[in-house]
C-alpha cells in the first residue's frame, strides 16, 4: 500500500476512534438532541415516584419502598447527567451568535439541573418524609403531599422557562424551528 494511502487509512481510523471515544465535538443537531434526550430521561424518571405515592390520593398508603427507590434513581440520574454536562463539548460555531447561543444553552441546562437537584433536596425529600411518617393519617399525608407536588410543579416550571428561552435562542441562531415538548411528541407519535 502506498504511503499516502496508509496515511489516509490511519487518519480515518483515528477519526473513527476519536468519534467513538466522544472526543469529536457534536454537530449542532446532535448537541441539542443530547440535551433533549437527557431531559426526557429525567422526566421519565419521575413516573415511578408518582406511581409509588399515587395511592395517597385515594386514601391508600403510599409504597414507601418504591418511593425511596424511585427517589434514589432520580437523584442518581440527575447527578449522572450533571456529570455528563460538565464535560459536554459544544458544537463548532458558524458565527459568534451561534457560539454564544450554544454556550448559553449549555449553561442554562446546567442551571436547570441544579434547580432539579434543589427540587429533589427540598420538596421531594419532604414528600418522602410524609410517606415515612406513621404518626399521621393517609388523608393528612395526601393533603400535604398534594401541596408539595404543586410546589415541585411550580419550581420546575420556573426552572424550565429559563431553559426554554435558551433553547429558543439556540434555535433562532441556527434557523431551527423550535418545538415545545408537546409539539415534538405529537410530531413523532407513531
Image (cartoon, grey):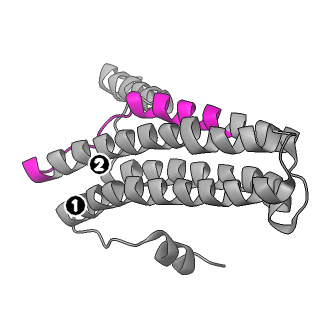
Residue bounds of the magenta highlight: 74-97
Q: Which mark is residue 105?
A: 2
Q: Position of residue 87 (x, y in %)?
A: 39, 27
| Vertical relation: 5 (above or below) 187 | above
Which residue is drawn at the image coordinates 31% and 55% (left, top)?
162
Q: How many marks?
A: 2
Q: Position of residue 23 (x, y in %)?
A: 39, 28
- Report crowding for label 1: few under 14, some 14 to 19, many 20 or more residues within 10 A (C-alpha): many
Q: Secondary structure at mark 2?
A: helix
* Residue nearest the observer in this picture, 57 or 9: 57
Labels 1 and 2 touching (C-beta < 8 A): yes
Which residue is drawn at the image coordinates 62% and 34% (left, top)?
75
* Residue nearest the observer in this picture, 50 or 56: 56
For marks 1 and 2 on the same chain, the one whose residue lies earlier in the sequence: 2
Which residue is drawn at the image coordinates 76% and 51% (left, top)?
48
**Residue 96 visible to an observer of this rendering:** yes
Amino acid at each position: 500500500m502506498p504511503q499516502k494511502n496508509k496515511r489516509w487509512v490511519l487518519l480515518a481510523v483515528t477519526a473513527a476512534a476519536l468519534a467513538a471515544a466522544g472526543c469529536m465535538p457534536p454537530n449542532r443537531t446532535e448537541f441539542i438532541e443530547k440535551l433533549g434526550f437527557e431531559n426526557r430521561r429525567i422526566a421519565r424518571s419521575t413516573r415511578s415516584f408518582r406511581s409509588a405515592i399515587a395511592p395517597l390520593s385515594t386514601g391508600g398508603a403510599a409504597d414507601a419502598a418504591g418511593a425511596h427507590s424511585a427517589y434514589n434513581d432520580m437523584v442518581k440520574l440527575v447527578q449522572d447527567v450533571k456529570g455528563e454536562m460538565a464535560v459536554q463539548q459544544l458544537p463548532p460555531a458558524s458565527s459568534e451568535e451561534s457560539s454564544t447561543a450554544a454556550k448559553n444553552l449549555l449553561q442554562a441546562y446546567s442551571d436547570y439541573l441544579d434547580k432539579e437537584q434543589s427540587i429533589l433536596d427540598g420538596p421531594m425529600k419532604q414528600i418522602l418524609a410524609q410517606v415515612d411518617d406513621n404518626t399521621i393519617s393517609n388523608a393528612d399525608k395526601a393533603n400535604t403531599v398534594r401541596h408539595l407536588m404543586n410546589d415541585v410543579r411550580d419550581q420546575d416550571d420556573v426552572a424550565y422557562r429559563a431553559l426554554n428561552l435558551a433553547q429558543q435562542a439556540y434555535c433562532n441562531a441556527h434557523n431551527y424551528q423550535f418545538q415545545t415538548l408537546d409539539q415534538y411528541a405529537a410530531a413523532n407519535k407513531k
